[in-house]
Image (tube, grey):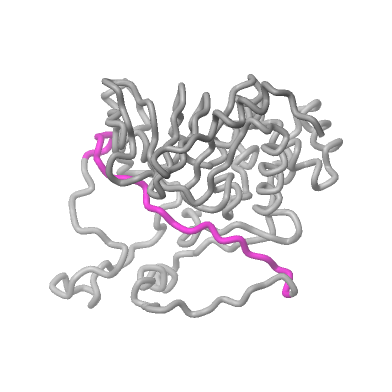
Amino acid sequence: MKLPLAYLALTLLSVLPLAGQELVQTDLVIYGGTSAGVVAAVQAAKMGRSVALIEPGQHFGGMSVEGLGGSDIDNHKPFQNSPAVGGLTLQFYRKAARRYGKLAEFDEMLRTGEKKPALWRFESHVAEEVFSTWMKEFPRIRLFPGTRLADAGGAVKEGPRLVALKAEGGQEFRGRMFIDATYEGDLLAAAGVSTTVGREGNAKYGETLNGIRANTTYNQFSVRVDPYKTPGDPSSGLIACIQDGVVGEHGAGDESIQAYCFRLCLTKDPANRIPFAKPAGYNPEDYEIYRRYVKAGGKLWKPGPALPNGKTDLAPGMISPAT
């Protein structure tokens, strides 16, 4: 196959040697191969721009390909939020529906405005296949898995302008525009961009549901649990997962961040299971809070096959609200 000279020139100029290191130069540099990063890359490529999509891990698609397949779309009885899904995001869901042979049913749901949460859900490997196939449609997208921003000097600036990103492996990525698509804002921090950590208070923007939620019935303990290692004895110390301190004023801001957890993909199919192995360093006392919660009459959320092919995604520690 013969390639146009213009294409060959573009390819040769996009990767240049830099004192024994690799220099990648594109129109757009995206750090973070999350679903947002993938969609941004696709959109830029559709607009004729060259893209370097950099991901510290080995998978592109973020939470969607790493366990979170139960989209919170049309799964709340009081309201319907699917009309808000559009653009490339809707294209992703249509591509996933096609892989399950349900595109006609999905499009009919869109036409009639029905609420069918099951049609918005997918298995993580299907999401990864959709993202991978989608990006392959655009040769202008170059993927760099396993490439982490350097801790020191990762953001190269000329005055206030970000001009390059340096990786731990020595690569340098130059672009006309940069997007931080990580969950943590790593590139923002390296570039010195101001950010807000924690919850903003209601008063900041005249809101009513922001800040500290001192009283809420959503996924909170429905029964009282003794927090001390020796029940009733404060001098014995606190059990795991309990923090000592004042909750704060309802609606006020704080500098706390949401806790991280694993999203587990589980199956009811014995032939598709991997046995749970006892982790090294496993300490049952780390889960004392849940044992006490159940013993006091609380109920833990029971997973069911909410994803295709008899699977579910489970956020550890989920509890049932008070009834």
The image shows residue 161 at horizontal and vertical percentages of 33, 21
Residue 60 as seen in the image, left or right of residue 114: left
Residue 206: x and y in percent read 32, 20
Residue drawn at x 86%, y 36% as measured from the top left: 104
Q: Compared with residue 12, is residue 147 higher up or lower down, i.e. above or below?
A: below
Whether the magenta-drawn stretch holds residue 28 is answered as: no
Q: Is residue 185 visible?
A: no
Q: Where are the magenta residues, as a range?
A: 249-270
In this view, the residue farthest toward the left is 235
The vertical placement of 140 against 303, above or below, is above
Q: Quadrant of the N terminus?
A: top right
Residue nearest the viewer, comparing 144 with 198:
144
318 displayed left or right of 99: left
Residue 302 in sight: yes
**Residue pictured at 40% horizontal, 78% vertical:** 282
Q: Is residue 253 above or below residue 65?
A: above
Nearer to the camera, 144 or 12: 12
Where, by quadrant of the figure, is residue 166 drawn?
top left
Q: Is residue 277 left or right of residue 312?
A: left
Residue at 50% across, 41% down: 54
